[in-house]
Amino acid sequence: MKDKKLSIRAGKLLKKIRELFCLARFRMIVLPILIMICIILTLVRGAIIRSMLDQNAYMSWDSHKSYGQVTAFFAEKAMLSAGSIKEIEYNLDKAMTENSIKSENGERLFKDCYSAIDNVNVGSTGKTSNVRAVGVGGDFFLFHELKLVNGSFFDKDNEMKDLIVIDEDLAWSLFGSDDVQGKTVLINDIPHIISGVVARQRGRISDAAGLDRSVIYMSYESLYAMNETPVGAFEVMLPEKVDGFGMRIVSDKLDYDESDMTIVDNRNRFGLSEMVKVFLSFPSRSMQLTDYKLPYWENIARAAEDIISILQIFILASMVLAFADAFSIGVVIYRNKGFTARSIINGIADKVYAWQSKRRPAESE
C-alpha cells in the first residue's frame, strides 16, 4: 500500500514537470539557439582579430604577452623625418630609465619602425608601372609579417639603401616571373635591386584600403631622397608594466599637437569598451575629417573594427536575450511548480526507499 502511494506521488511530480515544460517549451527552444549564436559570433570575432597580424605583432615577438604595441599616425604638416624618429627613440629610452625598466643584457627594451607612403614609377626592360611605395625604417618587417614568395626581406642596416621588396603582381608584370631576386629595376630612374617578392593581400576590403595596385617596400631614406615624403606612421612594442602603460608613455614622449597626430593602442583596440565606442560613433566614423594619410594596414584594421563592433553588439544582445529567456523560464517554473524543493527531495527519497524495499526480499532469498 505504501509503495502504491509513493508511486502515485512520484507520478504526480513527473506530470507536473511535464506540464511546466509545455508552458516554457518555446523559451527552452530559444535559449540554446541564443547561446549557440553567441558562441558562433564570438568565434568569428576571435578569428578576425587573430587574422590582423600587424595589430598583434607584440604577441608574436613576446610569447609571455608582457609587451604592448602602440602606433602613432602623423599629418603631413607634422613633417617628421628619420632624425625626428631618432629623437623619439631617445625619449623612449629615457622613459624606460625613469620607470625603472632595465635590460639585463644592455639591449634596447623596445622595438620600433616607421614608414611613409608615396607613389613612384618602377620600370625594367621597357616596361613601367606606377605603384604605391612604402618607405620603411627600423624593424618594419617584424611588425608586418608579409608572406614571402621568393627571396628575402632587406635588413634595416643595409648600407646602400638600394634594396627593395616588390609584390608578385609587379614581378610578373615586369619580368614574367616571380623568381626575380637580384634583378635591377629603376625607381624614378634610380637603380634598385630586388631583395624579395611578397604575396599581395586580396579582397574587396584590401583593395579599398589601398592595395588595389602593386606595392613595393623600400628604405625610407631612398624614398625621402626622391620625394621628400615625411614619416606618416611610427610603431613601437614596449614593456607593458600595467594595462595602458605603453599608450601613456608614447603619448607623453611624442611632442606633437593632437591635431597633428593620432595614437592607437593596438593591444586593446578590439576590446569590448573600444568596440562599443566605435559602434556609437556611426556615422561620423566613416567621415574623413583629418589630414592623416593612413597606410593600407590601418585602413584594413579600421574596417575590421567596424565589423567587430557590429558583431560585439550582436554578441551582447544575444547574451542579454539568453539571460532574459533563462530568467523567464525560471519565473514560469516558480509560479506553476506546485511543489517545493523539500517535496522534490522527499520524492527522491521515497523512490530510493521503494527501490530498496524491492531489493530486500530478493536478497533474503
Image (cartoon, rainbow, N blue to C red):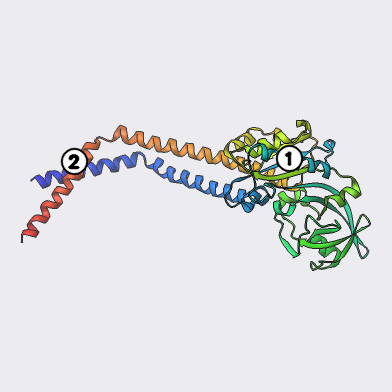
Q: Nearer the viewer, residue 166 or 359?
A: 166
Is 302 left, or right, of 350 in this rendering?
A: right
As drawn, the label of residue 72 is: 1
Whether residue 219 sits left or right of residue 25 in the image: it is right
Q: Report the front residue among 135 and 302.
A: 135
Q: Provide the residue designation for mark 2.
A: 346
Image quadrant assignment for residue 180? bottom right
Q: Nearer the viewer, mark 1 or mark 2?
A: 1
Horizontal side of 25 relative to 201 (left or right) equals: left
**Residue type at mark 1?**
Ala
Q: Nearer the viewer, residue 200 or 246?
A: 246
Q: On the image, which quarter does residue 331 sit in?
A: top left
Q: How busy is the neighbourhood of tag 1: few (under 14 within 10 Å), some, or many (20 plus)?
A: some
Q: In this picture, is 1 found above or below 244?
A: below
Q: Is residue 313 left or right of residue 36?
A: right
Q: Position of residue 349 (x, y in %)?
A: 18, 44
Determine which quarter of the picture holds residue 251: top right
Residue at screen point 10% across, 51% down: 357
Where's the C terminus, which quadrant? bottom left
- Residue type at the position of mark 2: Asn
- Residue extending furthest toward the front: 105
Query: Sequence order check: which comes first, mark 1 or mark 2?
Result: 1
